[in-house]
Amino acid sequence: MSHVEEHVEVNVPLRTAYNQWTQFEEFPSFMAGVERVEQRGDTLTHWVTNVNGVERTFDARITEQLPDRRVAWMTEGAGTRQGGLVTFEPVDATTTEIVVHVNWVPEGVAESTADKLGFVKRQVAGDLKRFKAFIETRGAETGAWRGEV
């Protein structure tokens, strides 16, 4: 199993950053390779990704969600095997640190090589930089789900 940890500080209050992160259907706006995310219930999402011409579809289940603190997930079913955790910490009243942990099992030689070359680490870092630009430019979240899992 491989692991990546990346973080970013965003210049919005913690509640704004967390609320936006719960809007999974907006992920294609800042996550490279994510074509679509469908929210199919309070804890189930369906993903369509395309990375370097390799399309994948999978379901992910929210396994833990504590408002303004953390969101954890794990894929379900056959195929893509990954999980992770996103945490939110206030730096001050207008700045939030977001830390993303992703664990996954690379599939095949190409993914194993990409993992060893740091591709996934760079992808997660880039996604966080795009999230920062997305939320700071807007200044407000597109919605919120404040439920607890």
Image (cartoon, rainbow, N blue to C red):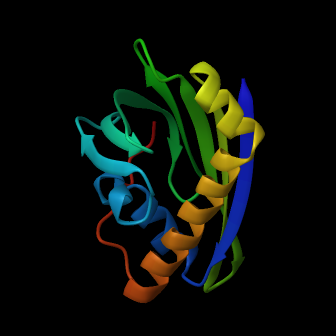
Instruction: Tell me residue 142's x, y (percent).
Output: 30, 71
Q: Residue 95 sits in which quadrant?
A: bottom right
- Which is more toward the observer, 127 or 54? 54
Instruction: Tell me: residue 31, above or below residue 104.
Output: below
- Which is more toward the observer, 3 or 54? 54
Which residue does the image show at 59% across and 84% down from the upper left? 11
- Which is more toward the observer, 108 or 29? 108
Q: Residue 10 sits in which quadrant?
A: bottom right
Q: Is residue 1 left or right of residue 60?
A: right
Instruction: Tell me residue 51's x, y (percent).
Output: 44, 44
Q: How many marks?
A: 0
Q: Is residue 22 left or right of residue 118?
A: left
Instruction: Tell me residue 138's x, y (percent).
Output: 37, 85
Instruction: Tell me: residue 10, above or below residue 59.
Output: below
Which residue does the image show at 40% across and 13% down from the upper left? 77
Q: Residue 101 sits in which quadrant?
A: top right
Q: Is residue 105 visible?
A: no
Instruction: Tell me: residue 57, above or below residue 34.
Output: above
Which residue does the image show at 24% across and 42% down from the upper left? 38
Instruction: Tell me residue 111's x, y (percent).
Output: 61, 31
Which residue does the image show at 43% across and 65% down from the upper left? 30
Instruction: Tell me: residue 126, above or below residue 87.
Output: below
Q: Is residue 35 visible?
A: yes
In the rendered image, the residue lying farthest to the top is 78
Q: Is residue 7 left or right of residue 104?
A: right
Q: In which quarter of the image is the N terminus?
A: top right
- Which is more toward the observer, 99 or 50? 50
